[in-house]
Amino acid sequence: MKQVVQNYKSGELALLDVPVPGCKPGGVLVRTAYSLISTGTELMKVSEAGMSMLGKARSRPDQVAKVVQSVATNGVPATYRKVMGKLDSYTPLGYSLCGVVEQVGAGIDDVKVGDLVACAGNEHALHAELNWVPKNLYAPVPDGLAPRHAAFGTVGSIALQGVRQGESRLGEVALVIGLGLIGQLVVQLLAASGVRVVGADPDPVRCELAERLGAAACGDPASPAVESAVAELTDGHGVDQVYLAAGGGSNQPVELAARLCRDRGRVVDIGKCRLDLPWNAYYEKELDVRFSRSYGPGRYDPEYEIEGRDYPIGYVRWTERRNLACFLDLVARGRVDVEPLITRTAAFDDAVETYQRLKDGELKAVAVLFRYPEQSAVDEPSADVAAMTVPAVPGARSAAPVRAARTPVRLAFVGAGNYATSMLLPHLAQRDGVELSTVVTTTALSAANAQRKFGFREATTDLDAVLGDASVDAVFVVTRHSSHAELTRKALLAGKAVFVEKPLALTEDELTGVLSAVEESGNDRLQVGFNRRFAPLLQEARKRFGARTGPASLRYLVNAGRLDHGSWYLQQGTEGSRFAGEGGHFVDTASWLLGADPVSVYALAPSGNEDLQVVLGYPDGSTAAISYVTTGAAGFPKETLDLVADGKVLQLDDFVRTSVYDGRKRWVSSRLPKARDKGQAAELAAFVRAVRTGGPMPVPLGSLVATTTATLAVRAALTGGAPVTLAEAR
């Protein structure tokens, strides 16, 4: 299928061939009939992509701050790969469309194949021939409403949410500053609510259009016409509400709002304009400044948008889905007229040319639709706190089948997110004897990006086709945590060697399912991405520390830091706790340094945050204390470790330096590397070598299971308030 994309680094726009997205549970696959260009938001993004790197940095200081922090945490090379990987990727455009349901996912019962729906979301309602859309981001189109008009649903919801934030009442007067697409819709919604409207925009054509659609008067904000109209309609008191629907870097809109708003009036920011509030003006009138967040309640909440968990109507009357349905109803009943807003309807095949004409100013438009030719017919578990058993590990298997000499190891990737594209694929793409065969993702564009950047032979959204491909030797599972165990189980049953990023499993049942697949298939070719034991500095330090005769004490401080709001790591209901997701890294590192698997787990957690203190016990009396904290200083190293035994001390300083002190006070410091090397390259080399030769996997299966079991036991230890004994594997 085809999709409109842009490369943020170069500014290139393209109509790209990408795989068809899969139809996941909880949503529907929609074939687009019409999609709407947001001439405000999208053109701002297109223009920003054409800036120099310095211009991009100036326009996004929030992202620059994240880059600086990443340099401090991960080093320059890793940060550079991560940033350039994001910049030099195709990103999607679009967020408002109408189309026909082509396939219905599990759990959906409110629409059927063939139904017409309006769709929203900058990750789901894209300028593409097919989109997968979750339940709370689509709404059925009322009978009789033309698809080209239903395509306005998302931008209509944005305007509607802004009007709701203004709490307008019958007979009031409002000022709408900015009469672009959103502003024109706000004018109509207010007029339909019995509010008299004054519009302000420097474009006389837009002013004339707003007056035809219900505004009492409109004019250039720099002229006296607007102030005169406000004075006449309000008897000199000022408007009850001001809606900022303008963009750009001028502070004129907020200054005009203060001047023309009545005492204790409301100012609602819908667009993205400069907001240097003149303190005296806003203070003296005690103006109520409000922000309108996109389509309404539910926006940016993954549990609502992705998982389909609705808010009770008694508590949240107007969610983004209810706003979408409400706007469609208003258009269907003729209370809002979107037809006059359509400046141009372009064929989807002409998308790149259309964007270029808009960017260059050759095409001046309020709203532009893409028409898709295919749619011509449509329109025009509970844990035991006393003990936890390590699942039985199937016995050792025979080596993998011998490969033909000099044939490359063919790898498939399931998932191509940030970690895969910045920390794994760059190493594999450079290795001799490796062929990147197929990349599988649920979103079409991420697969296409990975294929372009790393040279995969194929890109698809069909996992079964990959598992059934006899030429694929190994499958990498680099998806969200909740899918790891099931995807690993399927790949093992298909006879593939598997590299799965941590965690292997989020529950005991998931872990048991993986081991059952090993038993059923006779395939134990499994590696979990516990890369730190492969880090060159830690390998060198362990060698210098040497063998020990007595028990050891290990302290591991992980300064994990806080996550950004909206991170999927915070979705504990589906993705598990943060420690369940990444704690295996630190358990594995401790066990590798101590040369044994843990036999007991004890854990404490301060109330009110996600900090954890985990103590692991080992057969020889050694202990490992892992402090996993989210409340530390951002500038402090992320990982520091001390291992003490037999009069010796090994220290790790965030994979930048390791030191060993022996009984003779001799200190050995390894060289300072150019970047933090946490072992990914060496780990991947070991895995590929094992697949190629049929030799043992880099980490024994029993160790992988023990680490996973110990990580899962932390929850049981917290619940029971007592140590959890890990029984030996049967």
Image (cartoon, helix red, strand yellow):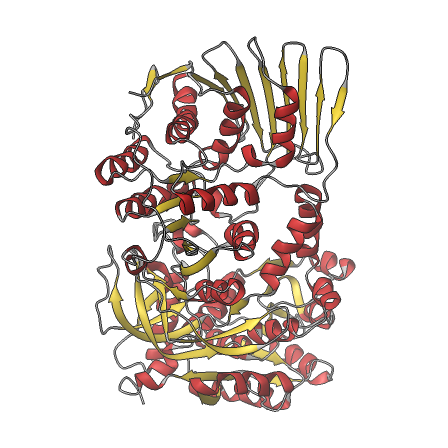
Residue visible at 46% across and 44% down in the picture? 689
Viewer-closest of 529 and 21: 529
When asked about the image quadrant of residue 661, the answer is top right
10 above or below 134? below
Does 587 sit left or right of 218 as displayed?
left
Which quadrant, please, contains the N terminus? bottom left
526 above or below 45? above
Does 37 sit left or right of 672 as displayed?
left
Does 251 sit left or right of 83 as displayed?
right
Residue 316 seen in this snapshot: no
Residue visible at 50% across and 27% down in the picture? 587
Q: Residue furthest front?
A: 405
Residue 520 image offset from top left, x and y in percent? 21, 38
610 above or below 615? below
Residue 260 image offset from top left, x and y in percent? 68, 71
Does 431 sit left or right of 667 as displayed?
left
Residue 648 image offset from top left, x and y in percent? 67, 14
Viewer-closest of 42 and 478: 478
Which quadrant, please, contains the C terminus? top left
When asked about the image quadrant of residue 624, the answer is top right
Report how many numbered discs are placed on residues in the image: 0
719 above or below 366? above
